[in-house]
Image (spheres, rainbow, N blue to C red):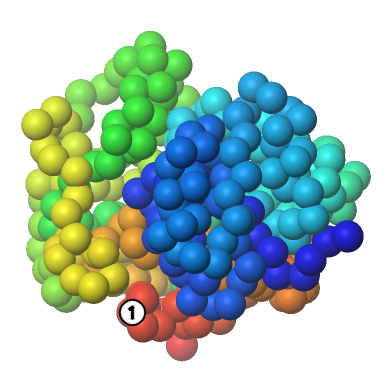
Amino acid sequence: MRTAGTVVVYGATGHTGRFIVAELRRRGFTTVVSGRNAAQLEALAAESGDVEARPATVDDAGSLDRALAGAAAVINCAGPFAVTGGPVVEAALRAGIPYVDVAAEIEANAAMFADHAEAARKADVPVVPAMAFYGGLGDLLVSAAMGDWTAADEAHVAYGLTSWHPTAGTRAAGEVSHDRRGGRRLRFAGGELRFHDDELAEQDWDFPEPLGRRTVIAEFTMADVVTVPSHVAVPEVRTYMAAEAARDLADADTPAPEPVDDLGRSDQTFVVDVLVRADGVERRASARGQDIYAVTAPLVVEAVGRILAGDTRTTGVASAGAMFDAADFLRALHPHLSVDLPH
């Protein structure tokens, strides 16, 4: 028998997973922690005191089924998602429960839409990939900026990060994506994803405060090139990354994030600034906060809460902007996120 409000977190012992477990517990969800390392799961369960540990591996479908037994939803935060996404969403569909992940990998998100849309639709189960800082937040901001528009000529998502100390999971996922592309990069233009070998270019971007004018890497392509076009009629989506953050990510010696407050957040400040254009008219939306990994927790937990409450706009595989009322969702994230949306 399914217990209302019980959420399984697959990959719970990772950096982002721990933030998600803490946020679920804060919001009163019964929480089950899962993943491949039984010892680490038991330690996390003992530390938390009120969660259950259920080890499972993606190469053992039976273990995944046991991990999801009786749950109301599953959150997958175990990368690389090119490896974990398929098996965990398939287990969720077998169980008939919603699946949400925090994948930033472009290929993994594209595969989620391509490979699982029909099964999720037939099962009438919500599946929301990239419900995280990368992919989900930008998609929500684009949707909120567009308002009553149903199409746009172009969408731009600029990431202003004062620094980027990547986790081990971020680095591993990046290596998988790099290898799958053969070192090539991606852009979304002409209504499709295209490989290219163009040199990286820099430009300036005027971010809202507290960042202001910053140099960004143009076409530093992120998961928004999958999430936004999945439901918005737009032929061009471009994403940009603050140059200092891009340099941190590229440097193999950049350490992992270190906590500076009681919530475990790092001292990283971020601003995500979105610009959409249609017929010569521009609309903007922005969000700012602290620590891209920490803010993923309220994003994904808010999504699960709304799905379980039936506060959704569709079913099957859908991005954040298609699944939820974007403006209402973003405003609900205060005080984790400060937003500036069109009136």
Q: Secondary structure at mark 1?
A: strand
**Which quarter of the image is occupied by the N terminus?**
bottom right
Identify which residue is drawn at 50% across, 82% down: 332
Number of numbered discs on residues = 1
Residue situated in front as seen by the camera: 227 or 256:
256
Residue that appears at 55% across and 67% down: 50
Percent coordinates x, y for residue 153 in the rendering: 49, 53
Is residue 42 left or right of 339 when viewed as pictured? right
Q: Is residue 144 above or below residue 254?
A: below
> Is residue 326 in sight in this rendering?
no
Q: Residue furthest bottom?
A: 343
Front residue of 212 and 54: 54
* Residue 333 shows in this picture: yes
Q: Position of residue 193 (x, y in %)?
A: 51, 30
The residue type indicated by label 1 comes to: Ser
Q: Is residue 263 left or right of residue 216?
A: right
41 over 83 or under it: above or below: below
Q: At which x and y percent is residue 67?
A: 69, 44
Q: Residues within 10 Å of mark 1 (few under 14, many from 20)?
A: some
Q: Is residue 83 above or below residue 297?
A: above
Q: Does residue 257 sit above or below 280 in this rendering?
A: above
| Left or right placement of residue 296 versus residue 123 in this view | left
At x 43%, y 42%, the residue is 40
Please name the residue that numbered disc 1 is placed on. 338
Residue at x-position 36% and y-position 76%: 336
- Horizontal placement of 211 versus 332: left or right? left
Q: Return the x and y of residue 230 as percentages of the image width and height.
A: 62, 47
Q: Quadrant of residue 94?
A: top right
